[in-house]
Amino acid sequence: MTTHYVLIDFENVQPKNLEILAKHSLKIFVFVGKTQTKLPLDLVSETQKLEASKNRTFCGTV
């Protein structure tokens, strides 16, 4: 099975919905700017749901 990588530049793009990604085997990387000190709870919750699903991994914030 192929693993896809999703790179989110949170400083420029704030995704509204990550549910579409639930169908795929993937790893998510969220990049934040040095002045960004918080992530929205809904984004964190959605990535945790993906992590709990089979073959999904949330790699964390870089």
Image (tube, grey):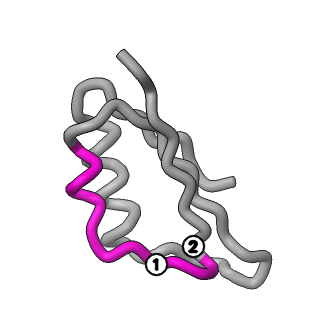
Quadrant in which residue 3 is drawn: top left
Above or below, comparing residue 27 to residue 36 in the picture: above
Q: Quadrant of the N terminus?
A: top left
Closer to the camera, 49 or 12?
Answer: 12
Q: Residue at 61% of width from left, 55% of height from top?
A: 61
Q: In the drawing, what numbered circle is on residue 10?
A: 2
Q: Residue at 29% of width from left, 60% of height from top?
A: 18
Q: Which residue is disc 1 drawn over?
A: 14
Q: Quadrant of the C terminus?
A: bottom right
Image location (x, y in percent) of residue 9: 61, 68
Secondary element under disc 2, as helix, strand or loop, is loop
Q: Residue at 54% of width from left, 41% of height from top?
A: 59
Image location (x, y in percent) of residue 50: 29, 44
Measure the alpha-carbon separation of dots 2 and 1.
5 Å
Q: Is residue 32 left or right of residue 58?
A: right
Q: Residues within 10 Å of mark 2 (few under 14, many from 20)?
A: some
**Marks 2 and 1 in Cβ contact (< 8 Å):** yes
> Start and end of the magenta stretch?
11-22
How many callouts does the rendering have?
A: 2
Amino acid at the residue labelled 1: Gln
Above or below, comparing residue 45 to residue 36 in the picture: above
Q: Is residue 22 left or right of residue 47?
A: left
Amino acid at the residue labelled 2: Phe
